[in-house]
Amino acid sequence: MATSKRNDAEPPGRSMNTIPEYALDQAARQENFPVASRLLSRRLRGRVVAFYRYARTADDIADDPALGTADKSERLQSLEDGLDGRGRSAVALALREALDGTGVGDASALAAARKLLVAFRRDAGGIACVDWDDLMAYCDASAVPVGRFLLAIHGEAADTHDPSDALCAALQVLNHLQDMAEDHDRLGRRYVPGDWMVQHGATDADLTAPKLSGGLRAAVGRTLDATDALLVRAAPLPGRIQSRGLRAQSAATLALARRLAVRLRRGDPLASRIALTRFDFLRAGLVGLWAAR
């Protein structure tokens, strides 16, 4: 997810807990794959917005270059304490309050929110994925819980889990490929599988080049091949979801993921920003509306 960078210390200015819901929704829609979509049920929007605020705050803590690893760990622990009803983290306490046990799947949703912290703690100390399995283990904590949260609060059946997990992992990998130069330069992270880079003669230094080297392009292509396989696994998801709004969002998101994968394969994310276009979003919206019929 990508909004303005913040941290859980709540410095001067408005805290995440005081930002109006409409403003947060507008920020969320600036992302490739928005979580707080207006396609979702108004009845559940409080839970979704609380989750978005929490995840956004945790992400900003892990990404803040001004914080040391120890400070990041302390602030992430404050978020976890909030999920347990302790501490001073307003966004975590608000999420706990939103998931008060009166809604379908609230307990599972809270567990998904807690799992996100595993990935953010790993991000906080820097990360270099050893291989595809290592990247998938990271995605299991960083992306899969987002889908599981949405499925839980909608009361969806267990047969949605595997395709949702695959879609969320694919979205995470595509975002990482978009941002691999910035992730390496600003945050000291590398998500492209290291063994594939070695096999194709690429090094981490290639991530700082003005364009993809032959070896790095081959490693990225291999990563996209594996991501395409995830999207094949994800394909049944919209057809298994009962909620019309969530079904529409999943279909639209799947369409956007496929389109971004194509753009990344054709382009060079080191030479220029590879991004979805307004037309891509329009077409995906139509796919979502058709799925919701």
Image (cartoon, grey):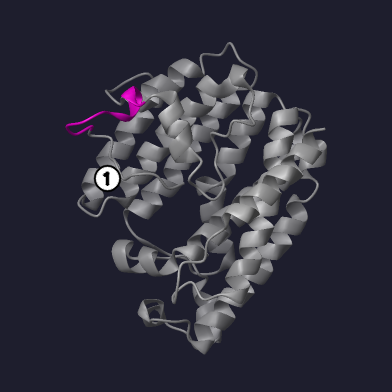
Which residue is at 61% across, 48% downward? 168
Name the outermost residue toward the left.
Answer: 12
- Tell me where residue 190 appears, x and y as whole percent: 42, 67
Q: Which residues are magenta?
A: 10-19
Q: Residues within 10 Å of mark 1 (few under 14, many from 20)?
A: many
Q: Is residue 114 magenta?
A: no
Q: Quadrant of residue 78?
A: top left
Which residue is at 53% across, 30% downward? 111
Q: Quadrant of residue 267?
A: bottom right
Q: Is residue 277 left or right of residue 283?
A: left
Which residue is at 73% across, 47% downward? 163
Q: Is residue 166 visible?
A: no
The front one of 110 and 65 is 65
Q: Which residue is mark 1?
A: 72
Could you tell me which secondary element the residue under label 1 belongs to?
A: helix
- Vertical comparison of 162 with 47: above or below: below
Which residue is at 30% across, 26% downward? 89
Q: Quadrant of residue 75?
A: top left
Q: Is residue 101 left or right of residue 63?
A: right
